[in-house]
Amino acid sequence: MIQKIVDVVQPYRLDKLAHKFYDDVSLWWVIAAVNGIGRGTFIVPSNTRLRIPSKSQIKDLIIKTNRSR
């Protein structure tokens, strides 16, 4: 499973990152969940390093998240 590391140098929105990497703004929560951010805001602070899961990892994350509900 391949995962990208992204350094956010200026404030950026989670939904825009999801669009950039997954072509789907609704998957913003995947980036937020993996990085423990996004509670109450879509904004990623500047100077933040993010892990971006590959598309193949998203399915596993969705299953894990649904089981924990």
Image (spheres, rainbow, N blue to C red):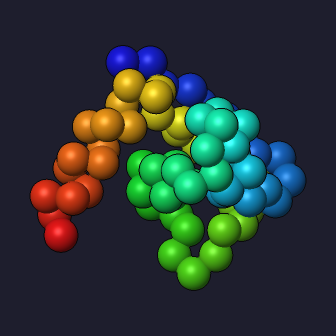
* Residue furthest out toward the right: 10
Q: Residue at x 72, y 37 (%)?
A: 20
Q: How many badges with numbers are in the image?
A: 0
Q: Residue at x 56, y 55 (%)?
A: 26
Residue 2 appears in the rendering: yes
In this rendering, would 66 be left or right of 30? Answer: left
* Residue furthest out toward the bottom: 40
Residue 18 appears in the rendering: no
The image shows residue 35 at horizontal and vertical percentages of 48, 52
Which quarter of the figure is the C terminus placed in?
bottom left
* Residue furthest out toward the left: 67
As drawn, 60 above or below 16? above
As drawn, 8 above or below 20? below
* Residue furthest out toward the top: 1
As drawn, 34 above or below 54? below
Q: Residue at x 64, y 75 (%)?
A: 41
Which quarter of the figure is the N terminus placed in?
top left
Q: Residue at x 56, y 26 (%)?
A: 4
In this rendering, would 56 be left or right of 48? Answer: left
**Front one among 67 and 1:** 67
As drawn, 42 above or below 24? below
User: Image quadrant of residue 59?
Assistant: top left
User: Image quadrant of residue 11?
Assistant: bottom right
